[in-house]
Amino acid sequence: MTRPRKVGTLTVSPTIWILTLVLILGLLAFDYFFHVRKAHIPTIGEAALWTGIYQGIALLFGISVFVFGGPTMGTEYFAGWITELALSVDNLFVFLVILGAFAVPREFQQKVLLFGIAFAIIARGSMIALGAVAIEHLSWTFYFFGAILLYTAIKMLWDEVHEDGDEDGEEEKDGLFVRVVRKFLPASEDFDGDRLFTIENGKRVFTPMLLVMIAIGGTDLLFALDSIPAIFGLTQNTYIVFTATAFSLLGLRQMFFLIDGLLDRLVYLSFGLSIILAFIGVKLVFHALHENELGFINGGEPVLAVPEITTQVSLSVIVGVLLLTVLVSLLSPRGRAQAAVDNAHREAQAYIEMTYGSFEEKRDTMYERMIAHEKIVESLPPRFQDMVVEEKNVRELLADAHRIRDKRSAFNAHGERSDEQPEGLQVTRPDGTVATDANGNVITVVKEQEILAEKEAKHRAREQARAEHAARKS
């Protein structure tokens, strides 16, 4: 008979572990079959509803830990959950870059994100198990974890302070990562719906969908090197570490579609996270000193002169820093400037994407909104215009929108209608960058229409090849 493992004040039996795993797997399965399986772009309302539901489930689980495990374990869970959730939100920035690098269609991004979450839970569960074993048998593990967090905090702060100088380098590294994945896993040039494999030239090959899933999963392994030591700095209860990590990840897919337009406004998030990681790193080192067994430190005896930081203090610091970071980001001049730029970018992009067949009144209303946001952007202090406006290529996007307006006005003045866009207009992606082909040539609207037609022809050819392949097998 297996003896239950005693952790903290809660006896976690194999039955509790199994029920917890069934709950997590059930939530993942529900997410897939009822939301992700049918490709679609979630609305803001849908994303908000399901974000609230999943975060509510995480809160209810924490309350149950309070009730059955006591205040200490409940506090440890919430401290770990909030910390992991904050780190996961920061990771969404990188996911945005990867999804953009592979040009994943918006309606298929849900499947990629859900795979990334499932992979993260499995990978981090394995790392948590290894971390628990290391903590139990190696006395210097807390020193090691503390050093990792302190290094990460310093690097995060350094990168944020030197953001302008390192921007090109970061983009080059992102591009290099994508190129490495493509090199070692050759795949079809285009997506085939949300399929992982397709038929090309009579052969079964990977699609970019599989490559981007591998890229997301591999990137999450790097994130885990920071997040796992962070939560072990708050609790050594393996059950709490795992559940706090899992529930922080479960609602990320819905949250991505809810806040991806707000992420850029959290301009000081990296500063807040660096403070939190540094605080937990110091807490880990202090804890290691209290349980010191290394001979070259205090003769192998515990160092009791340093304070022991309680979980209650940790939770207060984490929540306080995050709230302050969000408020300063949204209310600071830089945060308001970022909001103005995002609004102008969104309105200009929406106006450009409208077809000539749209109602004229609707086009005029959207254009007026764009003009209003453009005036706000132009009224920004020069330092914010240089720092934010250029980053998003908003000026180029607004200029494109004005050129389209002029073309449409000319058509209307002569009583003509056209379904064609101006031939020389550059295609601008939602991230504000000008679209280019594999050779670096700028793609115009007409060229993009040709590319889409070519992709459609390839898709029909693949469908025919798949049907012929299935017929030969039967």
Image: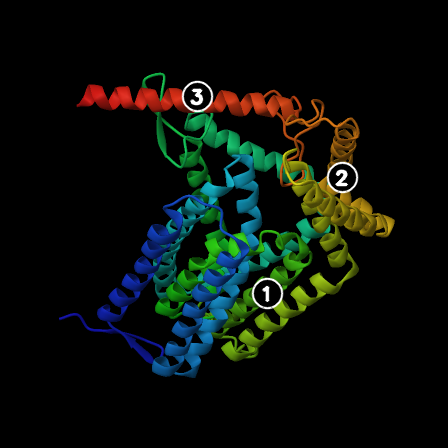
Q: Position of residue 204 (x, y in %)?
A: 32, 24
Q: Which residue is label 1 attached to?
A: 276
Q: Would you say 260 lies left or right of 457 here?
A: right
Amino acid of disc 2: Leu
Q: Position of residue 146 (x, y in %)?
A: 52, 62
Residue ID for mark 3: 458
* Residue on which the image places disc 2: 398
At mark 3, the secondary structure is helix
Q: Residue at x 65, y 21 (%)?
A: 441
Residue at x 54% of width, y 51% of height = 92
Position in image of residue 432 (x %, y %):
67, 39
Which quadrant is home to the N terminus?
Answer: bottom left
Q: Residue furthest top?
A: 201
Q: Nearer the viewer, residue 254 or 279?
A: 254
State whether residue 384 is above or below residue 359.
below
| Residue 390 picture quarter | top right
2 or 1: mark nearer the eye: 2
Badge 1 amino acid? Ile
